[in-house]
Image: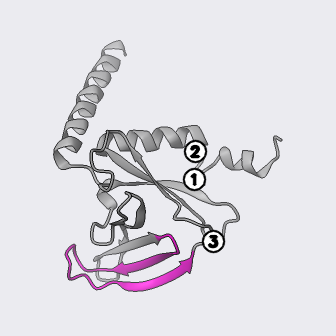
Amino acid sequence: IENHAYTEWLDNVDYAGLDRDQFYQNALMKSYLDGVSFVVMDKAEDELEPMVYVQGAETVDKDVLIVDKYGRLQQIGFIVVDGKDSDGKDIYRRTTWTNESVKVETTVDKAGKDRKWKLESEQELQIDYMPVYAVFSQQRTNTRDYLPFPASSYKIASINVALYNATTERVWHIV
């Protein structure tokens, strides 16, 4: 059992050295700050095993977010900065997940509805459903809402900042 591929994967779920429990802690901490975080299981082309990572609510592209009438995710996209081009402009990468495929697009356009996305790749999913799981840290009144309401997100964040400040002060006094 010690050499089983699954147990080896549990010791390094993100290819950066985090084990499963540490990864869960990170996902929960991110959801406490934003009200929701998204756990994504993905597979790099050159790797045999999948990896998991956390996407924050701030990276969700609201323009491609689709939820069915029962509150299930049908499509979600995440936008992150993926580097700089030769002119020094930020390159934005949008990864859009559906229940059928995953699509990667890039652009150098700033935020806005007029962005021109260039398709980099699109692949069919090798599993039956989208490998994106929402982790909520607050009760939702609307099951179709996957993004935090700014006021409630601020409320959660302000409590966490206060707790962080109190904890760091206490640690500083102990030291």
Vertical relation: 63 (above or below) 172? below
Give the mark toward the camera: 3 or 1. Answer: 3
Residue 107 in magenta stretch: yes
Disc 3 on helix, strand or loop? loop
Q: Is residue 61 left or right of residue 96?
A: left
- Compute the Cα span from label 3 to label 2: 25 Å
Give the mark toward the camera: 3 or 2. Answer: 3
**Disc 1 crowd, CA 10 A, few/some/many (<14, 14-19, 20+):** some
Using the rendered view, name the quadrant where residue 140 is placed.
Answer: top left
**Disc 3 crowd, CA 10 A, few/some/many (<14, 14-19, 20+):** few
Vertical relation: 88 (above or below) 169? below
Residue labelled with disc 1: 14
Residue labelled with disc 3: 126
Disc 1 on helix, strand or loop? loop
- Sequence-wise first label, 3 or 1: 1
Q: Which residues are magenta?
A: 98-124
Q: Give the residue type at disc 1.
A: Asp
Q: Which mark is residue 18?
A: 2
Query: Seen from this angle, which residue lies furthest left?
Result: 151
Task: Give the position of the C terminus as an image quadrant.
Answer: top left
Task: Give the position of the N terminus as an image quadrant.
Answer: top right
